[in-house]
Image (tube, rainbow, N blue to C red):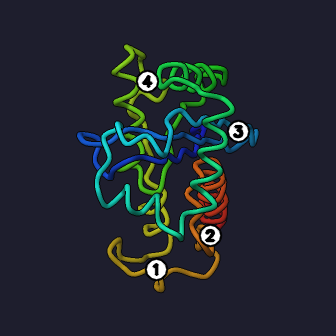
Amino acid sequence: MPQYFHVDVETTSTHTWNGVLLSIGAVEQESGQKFHMVFNDVDNRDLMWDPGTWDFWHSEKMVAPHDRIKKQYERDRYTPELAIVTFSEWVRGFPEEPTRTFCAWPASFDYPYVDEMFGAFDIVSPFHYRTLDVKSYLCGKLGINIDAPRTAFPDWVELKPEHEHDALSDAVAQMEVFKRAQEV
């Protein structure tokens, strides 16, 4: 049975080619051990920001998560290299067998950002390209079309009533949905 690592990232864009990671949060499903690092300043205009994403992060709706990320960054000031090396070491601290699997909602968004960071600092991915898209898994289990609106899902699928854009809490919420889906 795979070892599931639920991962969420916060970024400056929806595309890796014009964005950077702000933070990464993860939880290993079996042990519940958590990882969280903020390593870019949400107010740094020098980062590669997608204009819509900048406006989103600086909107009235995002005041609380924006302030949380900013305070954590100001307290810790991790560099991107230290963050991704530390994340890789944290994952590698778990046994290689069962196979380590990167889980995200959607994996097609989160994994490329993390994998690009591994590559930027010459780190071999501890996941070896093993990813699981939680939404696809859920759709398969429940017989729901992947393009269906959120209203097509049972109430327990709600990741959060209000998406917090806090990488760790989002990863934990995603894990809870996945665990519930495994029981269906």
The residue at the point 65 percent across, 50 percent down is 68
For the residue marked with disc 3, what is the amino acid? Lys
Question: SS at mark 2?
Answer: loop
Disc 3 designates what residue?
Answer: 34
Residue 50: image x %, image y %?
29, 52
Question: SS at mark 3?
Answer: strand
For the residue marked with disc 1, what is the amino acid? Arg
Dot 1 and dot 2 residues touching (CB under 8 Å): no
Disc 4 designates what residue?
Answer: 125
- Which mark lies nearer to you, 3 or 4? 3
Nearer to us in this view, 109 or 145: 109
Disc 2 designates what residue?
Answer: 160
Nearer to us in this view, 110 or 28: 110
Q: CA distance from mark 1 to mark 2?
A: 12 Å
Disc assigned to residue 95: none
Residue 171: image x %, image y %?
60, 51
Residue 7: image x %, image y %?
54, 44
Binning the other alpha carbons within 10 Å of mark 1 as few (below 14), some (14 to 19) or many (20 upward) gives few
In the image, taking residue 125 as reference, residue 61 lies left or right, namely right
Q: Quadrant of the C terminus?
A: bottom right
- The answer to which of marks 3 and 2 sits earlier in the sequence is 3
Q: CA distance from mark 3 to mark 4?
A: 18 Å
For the residue marked with disc 2, what is the amino acid? Lys
- The answer to which of marks 4 and 2 sits earlier in the sequence is 4
- The answer to which of marks 3 and 1 sits earlier in the sequence is 3
The residue at the point 47 percent across, 56 percent down is 105
Furthest-top residue in this view: 122
Image quadrant assignment for residue 54: bottom left
The residue at the point 64 percent across, 76 percent down is 156
Disc 1 designates what residue?
Answer: 150
